[in-house]
Image: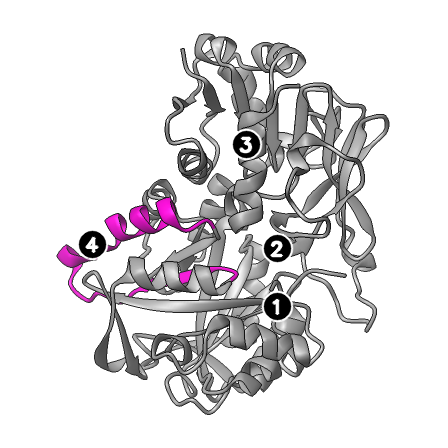
Amino acid sequence: MSKIVIVDYGMGNLRSVEKALQQIAPLQSIKVTSNPELIRSAERIVFPGQGAMPDCMRELHRLGLTDVLIDCAKNKPFLGICLGLQMLFEHSEEGNTSALGLFKGEVVRFKEDHLFDEEGKRLKIPHMGWNQVKQSTYHPLWKSIPDQSRFYFVHSYYVREKEAVVMGTADYPTPFTCAVGQDNIFAVQFHPEKSAAVGLALLDNFVQWKP
Amino acid sequence: MTLAKRIIPCLDVNAGRVVKGVNFVGLKDAGDPVEIAKRYDEQGADEVTFLDITASSDERGLILPIIEHVSSQVFIPLTVGGGVRQVEDVRTLLNVGADKVSINTAAIMNPQLIADAAQRFGSQCIVVAIDAKRANTPSGFGVFTHGGRKETGLDAIEWAERCYKLGAGELLITSMDRDGTKSGFDLELTKKISESVGIPIIASGGVGTLQHLLDGIELGGADAVLAASIFHYGEYTVREAKAYLRDHGIEVRL
């Protein structure tokens, strides 16, 4: 049985996530798979995602992974990353896509017309680079990570939650939710696997997390 | 509090070694790619870019194990470019651990490649590299290939806008007039492109001092600045560059 499973549904690059986990948990079995049985039997689930939401959801359905993901998200440590955060919500503006619906709320695009910094300079989409994350709620996954640490982001859409517990926010230029958590789920918009020491610390906290 | 401006050291790789030359000629050996990337990561680089300038096609595959090694040891974004011709090449590079792939000449020959690659892998990992030079075009800047020797007839600003519309996630703008000269970025070029597209711009070509990095951000409107030789030869560390920017009021990750 694999301890940690990285859910592979053929979209984007999962090697970075795998390599970062190997770095912090060299003795644990880490598997990248689309096999529903392996996912179901794992101890911990990492659910990454890149690219376009409609394609990701289509592939999850095609591979028959939606039910197993919803089940796993209810009963074992579950870490969503980037689109793996967005897909936990009900709906995305991107291609008018229905998602997994574990959290109430929707995924919306940064509005080009509203993106100006204090000096009136236009902000770019995607929101790409290192931004500070305000830890709004205490959570074991923030352990030993200083508040306002910078994590690496690259995304054009963000979640607008209704009920989920907000664990972190970032400003672009106004605050948006970049981490949510509830029971055994923790999900982030940024990429811990590409966020140097603080990112590895978050992954390490996840590997040790006993919700 | 806002998004930090990025400093990106660039490693030109020739047949598996890091090299540096002036205007793409007179290449000098600058060391082992894995060691150099690790050093930059330790100094606080925000990303690292690898540009494969290997001329012979049978030696070009040598970059793959390098990226594989680097991505197992360095946990910041890695961009790889050079010799990317088709969607399959993008996939190969992503599979060995690249986070973004930069496309240059092949995008000029076949702009649909940008759209196809962005559609398949997401805009976030598609960088279009534009080598520009002052020329007799509407904006005064033309797009060049072959290390600045071959004029394409494209206007640099129009091409940048087209890349943006086709789905590029970021543009890497290199002034071929300035590359290797240490006389600073072409700020007019950087600013014109940064103002005409809604995606992040990386300024490149010509950095010789820390002031040049600051100018690229403040005057050129760049979201990120890329430099090679000032870091390779130990003139400045990435950390010194960031401290300099911070002291001049720029948000950086320190």
Task: Kindly report the distance in space between the C-alpha atoms of the residues bearing marks 3 and 1.
Answer: 26 Å
Residue A119, how many percent across, how many down? 81, 73
Q: Secondary structure at mark 4?
A: helix
Packing grade of label 1 (10 A; few <14, some 14-19, many >=20) is many
Task: Kindly report the distance in space between the C-alpha atoms of the residues bearing marks 1 and 2.
Answer: 9 Å
Residue A209, how many percent across, how many down? 60, 24
Give yes or no for contact between labels 1 and 2 (Cβ–Cβ under 8 Å).
yes
Residue A50, how many percent across, how many down? 54, 38
Q: Which residue is mark 2?
A: A128
Task: Kindly report the distance in space between the C-alpha atoms of the residues bearing marks 1 and 4.
Answer: 31 Å
| Residue name at image x 44 percent, y 40 percent | A16
Packing grade of label 2 (10 A; few <14, some 14-19, many >=20) is many
- What amino acid is at disc 4? Leu
Say yes or no: labels 1 and 4 on the same chain.
yes
Q: Which residue is mark 1?
A: B223
Q: Secondary structure at mark 2?
A: strand
- What amino acid is at disc 1? Asp
Say yes or no: labels 4 and 2 on the same chain.
no
Tag of residue A48: 3
Say yes or no: labels 3 and 1 on the same chain.
no
| Residue name at image x 30 percent, y 48 percent | B69
Which quadrant holds residue A129?
Answer: bottom right
Which region is colored magenta?
Answer: B46-75
Q: Secondary structure at mark 1?
A: loop
- Of all chains, the one bearing label 3 is A
Of the 4 image quadrants, the one containing the N terminus of chain A is: top left
Task: Kindly report the distance in space between the C-alpha atoms of the residues bearing marks 4 and 2.
Answer: 29 Å
Q: Is residue A176 left or right of residue A186?
A: right
| Residue name at image x 47 percent, y 40 percent | B120
Q: Which residue is mark 4?
A: B62
Q: Is residue A159 magenta?
A: no
